[in-house]
Image: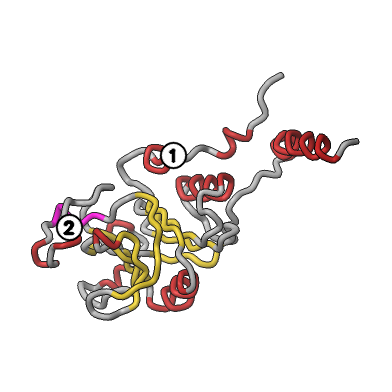
Amino acid sequence: MNGFFFGTALAFLLPCAQAASGDIQRADFGREQPSREARLIADWIVHSGDNQSRVFAIVDKVDAKVFVFDADGRIRGAAPVLLGSARGDHTAPGIGKKPLAAVRPEERTTPAGRFLAAVGRNARGEDVVWVDYDAAVSMHRVVRTQNRLQRLTTPTPADKRVSYGCINVPVAFYETIVSPAFAKTEGIVYVLPEIRPMHEVFGSYDVDARSAPTPD
């Protein structure tokens, strides 16, 4: 058989074979137990290639947890996080240029969305992973104020809404998982919404629904 037509036929048949066998590309959470929303978005990222072969992290605001993956969608680690004290998926206009003392309580949101993230320095000279530089939102080691260390250890997500918008993670997790993952390359941080529909924020889809065989 002609090599071109064989290859074309194989490319056409492969998705059908994968759907029929259940061999669908998905994220590997290992032993972690994510929320349904986190699993849906992770599977979509891997299935669609939305991360463009970059490392990526998923921040689940509702569960107050972060998952860090390698470029192939294998889990590197997960940890609880502290998030903006205000509920909302938006970024307050001009928030990145305000001093902290001028940020109103209702403006202290952790915005939802897909962000190209990279390691940098904050105003104190500390290394952080910038999630949204213009909005001054970063992922960094937990700040040792407002009982934040204790808040990280509680099982209640509401206890973890305390920051001005930045994503606080445990120190050891930052230094062993987050920093090495983003140190040599840009990555993608997906912050899941808590108000808006997920597909509206990311243009995502349910991998199982997309891959289900159609009736003859």
| Residue 119 disc label | none
Residue farthest right in this picture: 1
Residue farthest top in this picture: 216
Identified by mark 1, the residue type is: Gly
Tell me if residue 107 is in the magenta stretch. Answer: yes
Q: Earlier in the sequence, mark 2 or mark 1?
A: 2
Identified by mark 2, the residue type is: Ile
Figure check: 3 above or below 103: above
Residue at 49% over, 73% down: 184
Nearer to the camera, 131 or 28: 131
Residue at 33% over, 50% down: 112
Please state the extent of the stretch shown in magenta in the rendering.
Answer: 105-109
**Image quadrant where residue 58 sits:** bottom left
Residue 116's spot in the image, x, y percent? 40, 58
Residue 101's spot in the image, x, y percent? 9, 67
- Number of residues whose C-alpha sits closer than 10 Å to that of mark 1, classed few (under 14), some (14–19) or many (20 or more): few
Check disc 1 and report the residue beneath it: 203
Check disc 2 and report the residue beneath it: 95
Circle 1: element type: loop
Residue 15's spot in the image, x, y percent? 70, 37
